[in-house]
Image: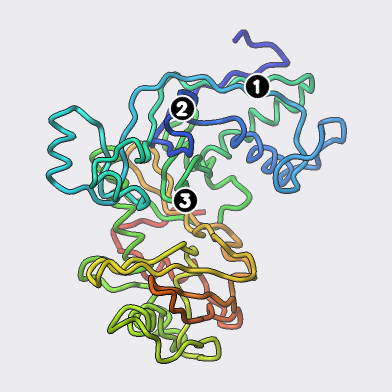
Amino acid sequence: MKKTDFTLSIPLKQHTPILHFQHTQDGAGLRATELKPKLDRLLHSVMQVPKNWLVGHGHNDITALDYKLKIKGDVTEDYLVASSIPRFVREEFQDNNQPFITSAPYFADNEPIKNKKLDDARRGRMMQNVRLEFFSFHIRLIEKIEEWLPVLLAYENFGLRQSKGFGGFCPDNFSIGDFENALKKHPDFGGGLYYRVHGGFKAAFKKIDEEYKILKSGFAKTPSQMEEYFDEQFNIKWEKPTIKRELVKGRGEPRQRDYTKDAKVKYIRALLGVAELYEFPRDNKEKITIKNNDGIDRFRSPITFKVFNETIYMVWSKNPIPDEIYDAEFTFTNKRKKSIRIKTPPKSINFNLEDFLLNHVDSTWNELKK
């Protein structure tokens, strides 16, 4: 596109595959319908937007801004993605030149891949020659987009599982210094850690998967750091032993159904993101569904992983956990439709996410100075 005062063309480099609901469609990838609302929201947060830039109601109560955005790019590879792919399946993929990513922080498609129902499995798409093309009659708006778009791309990912590093894009001329400066410029940036990794985004996803499991649920022989932190700081026990005792062990018939008034047992993992279910593969592959009756269906993790080349960034926001997550009641149900109820911790405990991360993430991570 020829550069004029009314147009802006920005080439991007994709750093990690993007997961998308419509992964089988040719147009699956970075989409204007996701990027534009995020950019609109950022511009609203950093300036008083002139009324003549507004064009009506946008997404999530953010008024849309008066510019057009087109995204172009060429598909280079589609990867099958799962947290665990058996060796015999991996070997078959390698023999058939089927690109895949295993040991990734994505859990929904393990079964289709294990059962070789690949049409039902999610794919992560990589693209090249990605270019954003903006048009607006408001020259000052184009200037603001040029200023703040790099900040948005440094802070946000796109598509599914974006908090775990999928869907990362940046301007193609970014250095690591440019990236870090843009990241820290975002108004929601609260702090971050970084870790150098070798082996491209596959190695980065493996590290993200392991680190997040250690923090939230425990991994291999390393216990959950959330479990240890809440026990030490607040004398609160995490929910997993109670769920396992009441809904998984024996016949899964709970002896006590209501733990909402129990000051010792709390659903602490919710503070790092509310899941749809928990699985116990060593206990008859038991699956426990999780539901909140007040509309908290999903709560995105307050920790976002960004990948820039071979550096992983663990980032948290200034206000990471909304008030409605605290003291919220959740129902846990097993396959036999037996349930128990547990609440999240109260806000009065003053859980400090930054303190937790700085003291419980492995020392091989370095702090990103604000």
The residue lying toward the viewer, choosing from 205 and 12, is: 205
134 vs 224: above or below? above
Q: Position of residue 226 (x, y in %)?
A: 39, 73
| Residue 253 image-quadrant placement | bottom left
As helix, strand or loop, the secondary structure at mark 3 comes to helix
The mark nearer the N terminus, 3 or 1, is 1
CB of mark 3 within 8 Å of CB of mark 1? no
Mark 3–mark 2 Cα distance, whole angstroms, equals: 23 Å
Tell me residue 214's x, y (percent): 31, 65
Tag 2: amino acid: Gln
- Which amino acid type is shown beneath numbered disc 1? Phe
In the image, residue 101 lies at what x, y percent? 27, 41
- Sequence-earlier tag: 2 or 1: 2
Camera-side residue of 1 and 84: 84
Which residue position is annotated with label 2?
25
Look at the numbered discs 2 and 1 and tell me whether their residues touch, using CB distance below 8 Å.
no
> Percent position (x, y) of residue 202?
28, 41
Residue at x-position 74% and y-position 44%: 62
- Identify residue for label 3: 163
Q: Nearer the viewer, mark 2 or mark 1?
A: 2
Q: Residue at x 64, y 34 (%)?
A: 36
Residue receiving disc 1: 134
Distance Cα–Cα, label 3 vs label 1: 26 Å
Q: Please tell me in which quadrant of the rendered image residue 3 appears.
A: top right
- 279 w.r.t. 173: above or below: below
Query: Does residue 189 lie above or below 6 as drawn?
Result: below
